[in-house]
C-alpha cells in the first residue's frame, strides 16, 4: 500500500484528484501563500471546519483567491491539540462528507490561514483582532460558552474565568472571548479603526442577540463608555447553522489515510447536508456568502426555531432514550421503530411543531422526514454519547422553551416531560443492565447528586431553578414527568416508549 502523504502547504500539490480508493479528492485551487485573514474565529472544532470554513473554501475556489481567510483562536487547554494538528499542516485539513447511500465527497480545506493559541501569546491574538483587515470575529463556543443563566438571562460574573477577566488590571491580558473581544474593540476605537462585526455561529435562539447582551454586560463592568460605543457601533447578526458533525475518531483518521491518501492529524467527517441562514447585517463588509449557498435574510428567527426545536430537541429525544435502550449510535436509535415513532409523532408533530412559526420556503412535513433520514445515516456514525453531552446547557436552552410555550398555550407536554425524565434517569449514571457511562456535563456532580435522590423525591431533578426555573410548580408538567421517570426506573425505557405511542 502506498504511504499516505503528510498534509501541508508544501505537499498538498501532490494530492488528488486520484486516490487509492477512487474517491475524488479536491484540493485548494487558489494560492495558499496569498491567503489574507479577514475573519478571526474563536472555537475551531469539527463543526466550524465542516461548516463556515467549508463555505469560505468554496468561495475562495470560485474567486481564485482567499481574501477572507480565517485566523483560528483557541482559548482552553484542550485547544492545544488543535494547535498541534493545524499549525504543522499550515491550517489545512481533510473534510469528508458522506450521504445516506455511502457516497463520499472529500476535499482539503484551505480557508484557515493561521491558528493562535491565546494562552501562549495573547498579544498576538489581540494584534490580529486589531488589524484593520479583520472585519468579522466569529464564535463557535457551544451553548454554555456564553456564560449566562438560562433562567434569568443574566451574565454570570462569578464564574472563575469571567471573574478573573473582570478584575483584570491594566496591562494584564484577558483569557475569555469576552475579554479578548472587548479589549480588541477598545484598542480599535482608540486607534480610530472601524469595529469588526461579531458573528455567533452557535445553536442558540437569537445567537447574535445573546452574544451582544453578554458582551455588553461584560463591557459594562469594565468600561461603561466603551459599552455604550459597542452598543451603538458594533453589529451582532443572528444566524442558523446546520450540519451533523460527529467527533473525529482514530477510524476516521485511518479512513482518510487509506481512502484519500492523506496523513491528516485531525480530519473532519460529516453528513452531506449543509445549511446556513444568515442575517445580512455586516456594516464592516463580508464575504459574498450568497454565491456559495448561504441564505442571506432579514429575519433568521423562523429558521432557527425550526432547527432548534425540531432538529436539536429531537437529538435530545433519541440521545437519552437511545442510550437507555442500549444503542450506541444515532443511526441505531433510528432503526428502533418505537423510538422513531415517539420522536416523530409525539415530540416533533405534537409538541415541537406547534412552537415553530411559518418558515419561508420550507415544507415542515418534508423537513421532519428529512431529519429522521439524516439521523439514520449509518455512514456518519454519530454517537449518542455526543448528543447526550453537556445536557445542562442544551435541555434548558432548547427544550425548556418548548415546554413553557406549550404550557402557556394549554397544549400537551407529556413527550417533553418524558425526555426530561430520560435525562434525569441517564444522570443516575447506571443503565438498565448495570452498565455505567460517563456523564459529560459542566454540572456533572450537581445533576448526578440530584439524580441520586430519586428514591426520596421523584421531582428533585426539577428543583434546580438555574436549569428549570419554576417548572416544578407546574402540575401539568410534573405529573407526566413523575409518571415517566417512575416507569423508566421500574420498567425501563422500552416500556415507557411503547406505552406512550400506544
Image (cartoon, grey):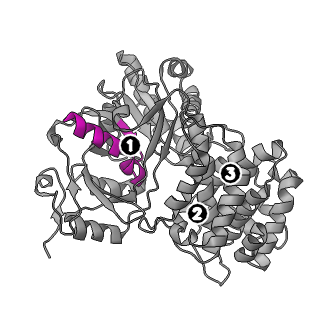
Crowd band around label 3 with a 10 angstrom C-alpha radius: few (<14), some (14–19), many (20+): many
Which element is circle 3 on?
A: helix
Residue in front for this viewpoint, 341 or 352? 341
Reply yes or no: does residue 144 show up in magenta.
no
Residue 341 in the image, given as x and y percentages of width and height: 67, 65
Residue 125 in the image, given as x and y percentages of width and height: 34, 37
Crowd band around label 1 with a 10 angstrom C-alpha radius: few (<14), some (14–19), many (20+): many
Q: Which residue carries the number 2 mark?
A: 388
Reply yes or no: does residue 42 show up in magenta.
yes
Does residue 103 show up?
A: yes
- Judge left or right: residue 253 versus residue 316: left
Does residue 159 show up?
A: no
Cα separation, mark 1 vs mark 3, equals 26 Å
Which residue is found at the position 38% from the left and 22% from the top? 284
Identify the magenta region. Answer: 40-65
Which element is circle 1 on?
A: helix
As drawn, 360 above or below 344: above
Residue 450 in the image, given as x and y percentages of width and height: 74, 65
Residue in front for this viewpoint, 28 or 465? 28
Q: Which residue carries the number 3 mark?
A: 399
Specify which label sits upstream in the sequence, 1 or 3.
1
Q: Which residue carries the number 1 mark?
A: 52
Cα separation, mark 1 vs mark 2, equals 24 Å
- Judge left or right: residue 11 versus residue 474: left
Which element is circle 2 on?
A: helix
- Judge left or right: residue 241 versus residue 272: right
Amino acid at each position: 500500500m502506498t504511504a499516505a502523504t503528510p498534509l501541508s502547504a508544501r505537499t498538498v500539490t501532490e494530492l488528488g484528484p486520484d486516490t487509492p480508493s477512487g474517491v475524488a479528492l479536491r484540493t485548494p485551487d487558489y494560492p495558499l501563500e496569498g491567503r489574507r485573514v479577514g475573519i478571526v474565529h474563536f472555537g475551531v472544532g469539527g463543526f466550524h471546519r465542516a461548516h463556515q470554513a467549508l463555505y469560505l473554501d468554496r468561495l475562495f475556489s470560485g474567486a481564485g483567491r482567499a481574501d477572507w481567510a480565517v485566523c483560528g483562536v483557541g482559548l482552553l487547554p484542550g485547544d492545544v491539540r488543535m494547535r498541534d494538528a493545524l499549525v504543522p499542516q499550515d491550517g489545512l485539513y481533510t473534510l469528508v462528507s458522506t450521504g445516506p447511500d455511502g457516497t463520499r465527497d472529500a476535499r482539503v480545506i484551505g480557508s484557515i490561514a493561521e491558528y493562535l493559541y491565546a494562552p501562549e501569546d495573547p498579544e498576538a491574538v489581540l494584534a490580529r483582532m486589531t488589524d484593520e483587515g479583520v472585519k468579522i470575529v466569529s464564535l463557535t463556543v457551544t451553548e454554555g460558552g456564553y456564560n449566562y443563566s438560562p433562567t434569568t438571562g443574566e451574565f454570570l460574573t462569578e464564574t472563575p474565568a469571567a471573574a478573573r477577566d473582570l478584575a483584570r488590571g491594566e496591562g494584564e491580558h484577558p483569557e475569555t472571548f469576552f475579554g479578548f473581544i472587548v479589549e480588541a474593540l477598545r484598542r480599535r476605537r482608540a486607534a480610530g479603526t472601524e469595529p469588526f462585526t461579531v458573528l455567533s455561529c452557535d445553536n442558540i435562539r437569537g445567537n447574535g442577540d445573546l452574544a451582544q447582551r453578554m458582551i455588553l454586560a461584560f463591557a459594562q463592568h469594565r468600561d461603561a463608555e466603551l459599552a455604550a460605543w459597542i452598543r451603538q457601533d458594533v453589529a451582532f447578526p443572528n444566524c442558523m447553522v446546520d450540519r451533523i458533525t460527529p467527533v473525529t475518531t482514530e477510524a476516521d483518521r485511518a479512513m482518510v489515510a487509506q481512502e484519500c491518501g492523506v496523513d491528516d492529524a485531525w480530519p473532519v467527517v460529516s453528513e452531506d447536508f449543509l445549511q446556513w441562514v444568515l442575517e445580512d447585517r455586516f456594516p464592516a463588509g463580508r464575504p459574498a456568502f450568497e454565491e456559495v449557498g448561504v441564505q442571506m435574510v432579514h429575519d433568521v428567527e423562523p429558521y432557527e426555531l425550526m432547527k432548534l426545536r425540531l432538529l436539536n430537541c429531537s437529538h435530545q429525544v433519541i440521545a437519552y432514550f437511545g442510550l437507555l435502550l442500549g444503542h450506541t449510535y444515532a443511526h441505531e436509535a433510528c432503526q428502533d421503530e418505537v423510538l422513531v415513532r415517539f420522536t416523530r409523532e409525539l415530540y416533533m408533530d405534537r409538541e415541537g411543531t406547534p412552537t415553530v412559526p411559518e418558515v419561508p420556503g420550507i415544507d415542515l412535513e418534508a423537513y421532519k422526514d428529512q431529519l429522521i433520514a439524516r439521523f439514520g445515516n449509518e455512514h456518519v456514525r454519530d454517537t449518542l454519547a455526543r448528543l447526550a453531552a453537556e445536557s445542562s446547557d442544551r435541555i434548558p436552552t432548547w427544550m425548556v422553551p418548548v415546554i413553557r410555550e406549550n404550557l402557556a398555550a394549554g397544549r400537551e407536554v407529556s413527550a417533553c416531560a418524558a425526555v426530561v425524565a430520560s435525562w434525569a434517569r441517564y444522570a443516575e449514571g447506571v443503565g438498565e443492565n448495570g452498565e455505567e457511562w460517563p456523564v459529560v456535563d459542566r454540572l456533572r456532580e450537581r445533576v448526578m447528586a440530584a439524580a441520586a435522590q430519586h428514591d426520596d423525591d421523584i421531582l428533585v431533578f426539577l428543583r434546580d431553578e438555574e436549569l428549570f426555573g419554576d417548572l416544578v410548580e407546574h402540575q401539568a408538567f410534573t405529573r407526566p414527568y413523575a409518571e415517566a421517570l417512575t416507569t423508566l426506573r421500574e420498567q425501563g425505557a422500552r416500556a415507557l416508549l411503547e406505552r406512550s405511542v400506544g
